[in-house]
Image: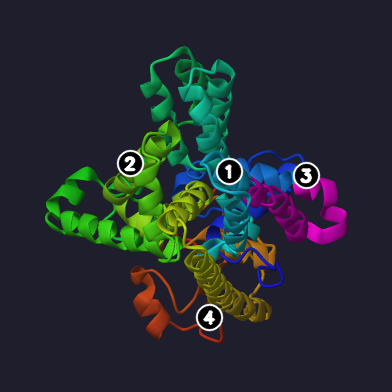
Amino acid sequence: MLVVSQPGYTDAYYSTLVAERVAMGQGLTADFVWNFIEAQGSGDLPVPSHRFWMPLATLIAAAGIRLAGGIFGTFGSAQLAIVAVSAAIPVLAYVASRSLGGTHRAAMVTATLVGLGGLFAPAWVSTDSFAPAAVLGTAFFLLFRRAAAGDVRAGALAGLAVGVLYLARAEGALFGLPLLMLRTRAGFAGAAVALAFGVGWQLRQAFLGLPPDLLARAAFLDRYEDFFAVAPPTLERHLAAWPEPAMRDLEALVTNAITFILAFALVLVPGLVAGTRALWSRPEVRAYLSLAVTVYIVLSLAFTLHSTRGAYFHSLAAFFPFGVALAVVGSASLFVRRGDLARIGAAGALAGIALVSWSAIAEWDRGFNGPYRVRLAAVSALPAGRLLAMDAAAWRWITGRETVVTPADGLDAASCRLRRVDPRVLVLEPAHFSAYADQYRAGAARAERDGIRVYDYRSPCEVAGR
């Protein structure tokens, strides 16, 4: 928490900002536009939020802001609520290890490894879905064993975990498949509970008007920046680019496989394989492997560019604690009657996870705190008015001003769409959409601070009747 002292990246900025509005009684709304999925029609701000992301992390953060916002501030209170959830992660990891047949000592090693987090170290304290997904995913695998044995109550609770997990991550809906495959009362009870959550959320989305371009922006991207364009990508254009989409799918399969290995700090992967083989007769282990493979394939092949830019790493949080428990139990089976080797192996795993955790925190500091300070220093150069910026959520947080994302297909494509919002200031950073390359390179900027260039903007579209 000493390093993760501000949201840092778009997802966390978004959750924290909307959480503040929820805590103030303004509901799931946003006074900024991070993507044109949330700017349907030509209405002014605020807009309904969470047309793309799921709301659980926001609701947890809102509870923290509501309870302690006056003491710790907006972000500190939101973060404390997430940390309270994170506190359950090592506890559930311990229980998972014991349920898989691990000794008390092995379970304590598991809890320590999971608590340290590895790549997830900064994630456990981020105002994002990582911690809730880790808790709910682990709870699901623990409950699934009893549900597979015919316990209807456990099946219903497993379905509850799936339903709430869906509200954290959309791919959480896939966790309902093992329940359906049980074909028992327990399985159907769990599936029904999970379905109720899914239907409830989709009714909310339908009431607001389902974004017609949601699937296109999720699955038909040829460039990731097209996700932020006014005009959505199309299936025809996506297929016309063949075979490039197939090459991107293959690259995503490789990239996400590497992400999986790094998430388990490499040293735990042999134990994970050994544990899966040794405990294959257990239903929760089979469910774990089938879900891990399914999520990996679906995200890599169907939501390719999103998966390699964080979506797959987000999804791994639900698999990490139980996977570590399985890896530690599997590693222990490799060192039967070899106490010294077992201790050396445990020490090596702890050292590996600790090193990866330290590296992840240092990388978070370099990748997010540095740019935050640069943006903060540039605020004094901004004239009055609403903003246009590539990372609208970040600039809304830093400046307190209503902000709209710069359209990836250029301002001309959005001039009429923006007329009601009426932004007056264009902010271009060194990292910008390709449509703005000429303006960033040669346009007359009003001001510049550390590579951040500020321009006056006025929509040429007719604004009569505003």
Question: Would you call the spot at circle 3 few (<14 residues within 10 Å), some (14-19), or many (20 or more)?
Answer: few
Q: Look at 51% across and 50% down and name the residue there.
A: 325
Q: Which callout, 4 or 1, points at the residue further toward the start of the chain?
A: 1
The Cα–Cα distance between marks 2 and 1, rounded to whole angstroms, is 26 Å
- Give the extent of the magenta segment: 64-91
Q: Is residue 134 above or below residue 266?
A: above
Q: Is residue 166 above or below residue 357?
A: above
Residue named by callout 4? 452
Q: Which mark is residue 98?
A: 1
Q: Which mark is residue 294?
A: 2
Q: Which callout, 3 or 1, points at the residue further toward the start of the chain?
A: 3
**Residue type, label 2:** Thr
Task: Say what secondary structure mark 3 lies in.
Answer: loop
* In contact (CB < 8 Å): disc 4 and disc 1: no
Q: Which callout, 2 or 1, points at the residue further toward the start of the chain?
A: 1
* In contact (CB < 8 Å): disc 4 and disc 3: no
In the rendered view of the protein, which quadrant contains the N terminus? Answer: bottom right
The Cα–Cα distance between marks 4 and 3, rounded to whole angstroms, is 32 Å
